[in-house]
Image (cartoon, rainbow, N blue to C red):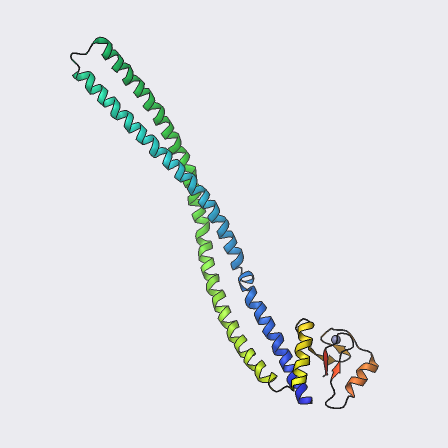
């Protein structure tokens, strides 16, 4: 039975290691700093998308104005050609065409003014986009490094986990069925720890001290008898 209890403690220690390795694996993205870098990159990307949308709107406005300006230029040129060719037109027609040319010239100036404003508005947005790129670039690089680091750490943990799971199965196969069942039931109920060591007069499962009478009783149990911590109910193995 002493042997069985040694194997039981080995199983418990391996189960504790396995749980710790799984937690470490789950927390890698957070603990490596990758989560923080990803969050910052997401924030910068949202800002970039916003600035890019404003830049696109300004470009569209400029294109629209250019098209209008081109249309006006075309109409004015056509009227001017008609005026120069219009030897037989009446004075009134010529005046009307002249007025239209003036009107179109004024309108084109207004649109050119608007186009200039849109072009000037574009500069700070372009600067904003360039600044965002400057901030993202080193973070992207850091994110790449961290992703590679996390992947390496995951492989390392997976190897340790595979080894621990293998050893655990080997140790568990050496336990009497009743003891194994009792351990599993306790472990499920008591946050992963079903077996504890009695160290001095303290149970290392619940960390409480047992009375000296209780400790004496446990230490003098005949081989094959299994002790239980009176505080937490775990299987208690004197050590
Ligand atoms: Zn205890």
157, 88: nearer the viewer: 88
Q: In the rendered image of this protein, does residue 210 appear above or below residue 96?
A: below
Q: How many marks?
A: 0
- The image quadrant in which ligand 1 is located: bottom right
Q: In the rendered image of this protein, does residue 69 appear above or below residue 27?
A: above
Q: Please, which residue is most extreme toward the right here?
A: 213
Quadrant including the N terminus: bottom right
Query: What residue do we see at 33% from left, 20% from top?
Result: 106
Query: What residue do we see at 55% from left, 61% from top?
Result: 30
Q: In the rendered image of this protein, does residue 45 appear above or below residue 239?
A: above
Q: Quadrant of residue 63?
A: top left
146 sits to left or right of 239: left
Q: In the rendered image of this protein, does residue 49 appear above or below residue 143?
A: above
Could you say where residue 58 lies in the image, as x and y percent from the top left? 39, 36
Quadrant including the C terminus: bottom right
Q: Quadrant of residue 4?
A: bottom right
233, 34: nearer the viewer: 233
126 sits to left or right of 89: right
Q: Is residue 193 visible?
A: no
Query: What residue do we see at 54% from left, 81% from top?
Result: 166
182 sits to left or right of 231: left
Could you say where residue 89 lies in the image, as x and y percent from the top left? 19, 12
Query: What residue do we see at 43% from left, 37% from top?
Result: 124
180, 239: nearer the viewer: 180
132, 53: nearer the viewer: 53
Could you say where residue 55 lies in the image, as x and y percent from the top left? 40, 39
């Amino acid at each position: 039975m002493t042997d069985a209890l040694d194997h039981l403690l080995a199983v418990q220690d391996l189960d504790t290691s396995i749980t710790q390795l799984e937690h470490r694996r789950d927390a890698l993205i957070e603990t490596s700093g990758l989560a923080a870098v990803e969050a910052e990159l997401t924030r910068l990307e949202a800002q970039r998308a916003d600035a890019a949308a404003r830049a696109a709107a300004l470009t569209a406005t400029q294109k629209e104005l250019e098209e209008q300006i081109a249309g006006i230029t075309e109409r004015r040129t056509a009227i001017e050609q008609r005026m120069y060719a219009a030897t037989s037109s009446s004075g009134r027609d010529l005046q009307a065409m002249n007025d239209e040319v003036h009107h179109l010239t004024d309108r084109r100036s207004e649109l050119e003014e608007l186009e200039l404003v849109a072009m000037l508005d574009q500069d700070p947005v372009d600067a904003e986009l360039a600044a965002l790129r400057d901030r993202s670039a080193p973070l992207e690089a850091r994110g790449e490094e961290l992703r590679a680091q996390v992947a390496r750490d995951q492989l390392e943990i997976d190897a340790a986990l595979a080894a621990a799971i293998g050893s655990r199965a080997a140790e568990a196969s050496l336990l009497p069925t009743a003891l194994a069942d009792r351990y599993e039931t306790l472990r499920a109920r008591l946050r992963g720890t079903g077996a504890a060591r009695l160290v001095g007069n303290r149970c290392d499962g619940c960390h409480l001290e047992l009375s000296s009478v209780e400790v004496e009783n446990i230490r003098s149990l005949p081989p094959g008898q299994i002790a239980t911590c009176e505080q937490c109910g775990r299987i208690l193995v004197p050590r």
